[in-house]
Image (cartoon, rainbow, N blue to C red):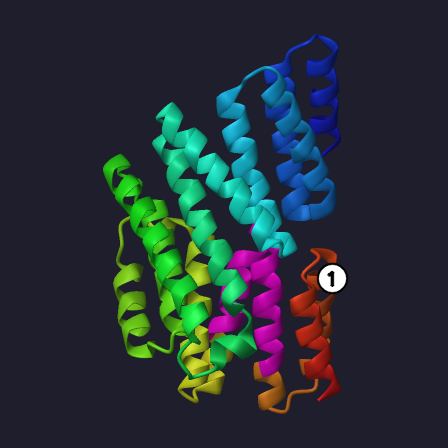
Amino acid sequence: MARLEESVRLFDKVGDEYGVIDASCNLGLVQLRWGDPNAAEQIFLTALDRARKIADVRGEAWTLEILGECAMILGRRTAGVRYLQDATELFAAAGERRGEAFALSNEALLIIDDLGWLPLPALARDALPPAAEQDAHHASALLDRAEKIFDVLGDARNSALVAVARIRIKILSGRDREAAKDARRTESMEGFDLDWRLRGLLLHCEAVLAHRSGSVRSALAKCEEALSLVQPFGDRPATASMTLHAGLLRKTMGEQDAETRVRKAQGIFREIGRTDGAQLCDRILAG
């Protein structure tokens, strides 16, 4: 991080605004993944202001896209949607299709997270209420648009990411058989084996499905493996969710370290500003 901070200072010293913006965004990404999301947000907002002052449309679009991801981690749906929609418009106007698809898919992921992608809500068997179902349909439509672009670009990795997002929607909607079938199909997609983080996200979907079917030991094994794959990438929201799920599964099995897992998840949720996750941990610990 120190080298990135020095890079920002050097670009600023020589008056290279484009360099400042790019280096600032890289610094913000490091803060977002492994440091302080709130500090990252301030870095991105400063970069956004500088991009707008010099009419750097590409820099503005990518900064807005990253701000959307930041808002997703911080649980700020309204702001996140606004950032990502603005980014989508700028990318489309500039003809930058991959950026457009990223913004569309991240808006869908933000909606999915807001629907309750935490273990307890995800384990509910009932269908989503009408308002939430409408949001799920909107997320699916965004994924459709993103998938078409990734297909045209031949971007197999991100096509697989869209497929995993669809599985999450089906799990939340109680469509377990469809989700399980899609999970098997996704595993065979081109390039899937090369992306360990994506495999971890899919494994967590499979862990939820196994838990719902009553296969607690299988669910725990999948959840622990998913955690080992995702955690090294600095994906703290996913790490917190999987850690909490592992704690719940261990609690069901009567294991002594279950509470430790839940408290660890609670600490991560607090660090990234996800009060919904921290409060859920409170309820589990109180019970």
**Rendered image quadrant of residue 88:** top left
**Residue shown at 50% from the left, 22% from the top:** 57
**Residue shown at 34% from the left, 58% from the top:** 140
Q: Is residue 200 above or below residue 125?
A: above
Q: Is residue 118 magenta?
A: no
What quarter of the picture does the C terminus occupy? bottom right
**Residue shown at 72% from the left, 37% from the top:** 42
Magenta span dominant secondary structure: helix
* Residue 4 percent location from the top left of the image: 69, 28
Judged from the image, the secondary structure of the residue bearing numbered disc 1 is: helix
Q: Which residue is mark 1?
A: 270
User: As drawn, is 43 to the left or to the right of 60?
Assistant: right
**Rendered image quadrant of residue 252:** bottom right
Pick the residue in front: 251 or 266.
266
**Residue shown at 62% from the left, 29% from the top:** 48
User: As drawn, is 80 to the left or to the right of 176?
Assistant: right
* Residue 87 percent location from the top left of the image: 48, 35
- Residue extending farthest to the front is 131
Circle 1 Cα neighbour tier, 10 Å, few/some/many (<14 / 14–19 / ≥20): some
* Residue 18 percent location from the top left of the image: 59, 16
Pick the residue in front: 144 or 180.
144
User: As drawn, is 9 to the left or to the right of 61?
Assistant: right
Q: Is residue 247 magenta?
A: yes
Q: Which segment is the magenta one?
A: 222-248
- Residue extending farthest to the bottom is 254
Pick the residue in front: 245 or 287.
287
